[in-house]
Amino acid sequence: MRRTRYHLLGAAAFLLPALLIFLAFTLYPFVLTCVQSVFTTNAKGDLVGFSGLDNYIRLFQSTIYRISLKNTIVYIFLTVPGTIVLSLAMALLTSSGRKGMGIFRTIFTFTMGISVAAASMFWTFMFHPTMGLLNTVLEMFGGERVGWLTDMDVAILSISIVTIWMNTGYCYLILLGGLKSIDKTYYECSDIAGVGGWQRLRKVTLPLLSPFLFYVLVISVVNAFQSFGVIDMMTHGGPANSTNLLVYSIYEDVFVNYNYSFAAAQGVVLFVIVTLISLLQMKIVERRVTYQ
Amino acid sequence: MIRLENVAKSYDGKTMVIQDINLEIKKGEFFVLLGPSGCGKSTLLRMIAGLEKITQGDLWIDGQHANDLLPKERNLSMVFQNYALFPHMTVRDNILFGLDARKVDRQEQEERLGKVAEIMGLAEYLGRKPGQLSGGQRQRVALARSICSQTPICLMDEPLSNLDAKLRGQMRSEIRRIQRMLGLTIVYVTHDQVEAMTMGDRIMVLNGGHVQQVGEPLEVYNNPENLQVATFIGMPQMNVFRAQTEEEGLRMNGSLLLRSRSGRTIRLPGQEFEAGIRAEHFSQTGGDADYVLEAEAAMVEYTGDETQISFADGQGYSVVKWPGQVPVRAGEKLELGVDAEHLYFFDRETGRRLRQGGGEGQ
Ligand SMILES: Nc1ncnc2c1ncn2[C@@H]1O[C@H](COP(=O)(O)OP(=O)(O)OP(=O)(O)O)[C@@H](O)[C@H]1O
Ligand SMILES: [Mg+2]
């Protein structure tokens, strides 16, 4: 009895630092947000009065919020498949032990070392209506200029391109590592059986890579929900809210409109959405994942 | 069925991993590649499979020059040491793997599956994933996949090395039974001489990338062509002594005397060579044996059905093996008999087998 208590104390001592950090930086803000969301707040963020579900009701009546929800969904459907397909293709192309592949591996991963700010600068220039490389090339081939960041219908696509460009490096690295970890006798077995090309990709490579694909999928979805930097740097949610995503909308309500409790409600809803989607992924997608 | 002519392999273009392989494996033969770790067994097998390029020489499969054929064009199957079962597929899909690619129609696949599952006793496991099977069952699935492909040649690289001793014994006879039943040509790689002896129609002993000997198991056991083969095959290892001819017989390791009873002298070129005696070839009493060796038992071990006694031989310890439970105590003096036909002689430098009377068997 005394022994176990002693052990518990020892364990607690080791856990304490991590526990404190968790309490201070994760649990406390989370609880505070939940509390704020059912109050009204003044411009300094102090709780003024209990408001029940008012914030939530206002939220679902707000057009801007609905637009940002729709934008986020579009953004996810553009960036997640885009990132995964691109990084998978690059990983498949460079995973062979052929000479010279090392150069490509370096090229494909270098975006990991670039900050959001630098990337945004670079792409803002690329997207520039008159001097940008993209439009220059388009015009060279007789195309028309595109308002990459100024056209309401195109801006979300442009933002997605930048996001894919930034996230592909990391996903590529994960998938490349995954491909390398596949036992080569599986391939030899396929060679002897005459299973090659697409067949092999579908029946052997992808299933064996599935734990890595799953990880990349979860990470990409969560990242997409939390995307902020690129929007803040390049479009500020515009033009006309066409790139206003959930997190950016929260940011605006806190730091532009000083509407703390309204932002808190959005935060809570975002939390619920991300949690639900993650659970859904675990339940549905992970069933199709086989760990070696 | 499979013919190799002067085959050699080098991975780095400089050092040869295996060399001068000349070999013909017949249809329906169970052919074993035996040798210590790193001698090039897997390399040779993988060259036959087409998984490694052949650096030099020629490979013929079924009369066709096969050096440049793709693995799938060689019409063979392979069982890997780690089985290479796909963890995401059921046993059923694992067994049928590759049949679609070979354009075998669905009905035919079902028939083959049914038959193979019955032979291998896998019928009730077809819906499981490999992760839910025991080692022996996985081994069976790997074998079933190979059989299901109905290729005439099956290559196996140490397929039993992940199993425990008992299961290994079981699977040995099972593989042999199926091979006979289906008339398969099997090339089987192992470093386990018991597997080689019990399963093979013929054995090829490899060492350091060179062929040491090719022959039927008992032939190789009874007539090893050199010291390496002699010591590699047989448990416990053949006892080897530094021998010198003397008037009364043979001086072993400069200490023990193997006394000649008949007064016959050993006629060999040169006076010094290696002499080998298998543990089971020592008789329990001098009796009417051709040679007698006096020694003192150092340690006695009983396995139940056998007694192993070791004695100091002036260099290290040599071993005697007798059937049954022989009452011997450590320290006891032994008089061991050896018949002339059970004495092997080897050249000290080259390890080549020496035979008495100018090349004839003794
Ligand atoms: N891919 C490779 N590249 C370079 N050298 C290799 C390669 N594969 C094997 N070798 C070398 O070739 C020699 C023979 O290897 P091999 O795998 O054929 O041995 P083995 O007889 O199968 O041994 P084991 O019983 O341990 O499996 C070894 O010295 C090994 O180091
Ligand atoms: Mg090997």
Image: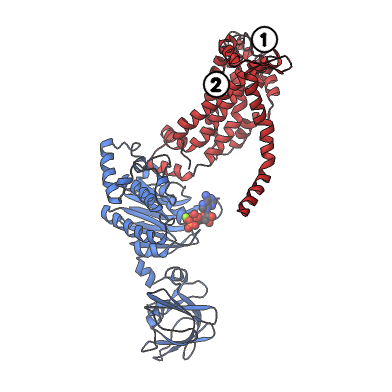
Chain colours: A red, B blue
Position of residue A86 measured from the top left corner of the image (x, y, whole percent): 54, 27
**Residue holding disc 1:** A130
Residue B150 seen in the figure:
no
From the viewer's perspective, is the residue at label 2 or at label 1 nearer? 2
Contact, mark 2 vs mark 1 (Cβ under 8 Å): no
Above-or-below relation of A182 to B14: above
Position of residue B292 measured from the top left corner of the image (x, y, whole percent): 43, 87
Please tell me how crowded label 1 is: few (under 14), some (14-19), or many (20+) other residues with Cα within 10 Å: some
- Asked whether mark 2 lies closer than 8 Å to ligand 1, one says no
Of callouts 2 and 1, the N-terminal one: 2
Residue depicted at 33% across the width and 62% down the height: B201
Q: Mark number for residue A35?
A: none
* Marked residue chain, label 1: A
Residue depicted at 38% across the width and 59% down the height: B168
Above-or-below relation of B10 to B305: above
- Give left or right: position of B241 versus B139: right
* Marked residue chain, label 2: A
Q: Tag 2, which secondary structure?
A: helix
- Residue nearest the observer in this picture, A177 or A52: A52
In the picture, which quadrant includes the C terminus of chain B? bottom left
Residue depicted at 33% across the width and 58% down the height: B30
Residue type at mark 2? Ile
Instruction: Give the Cα distance between marks 2 and 1.
Output: 29 Å
Q: Tag 1, which secondary structure?
A: loop
**Residue holding disc 2:** A76
Please tell me how crowded label 2 is: few (under 14), some (14-19), or many (20+) other residues with Cα within 10 Å: many
Residue type at mark 1? Thr
Position of residue A166 measured from the top left corner of the image (x, y, whole percent): 62, 25
Residue B224 seen in the figure:
yes
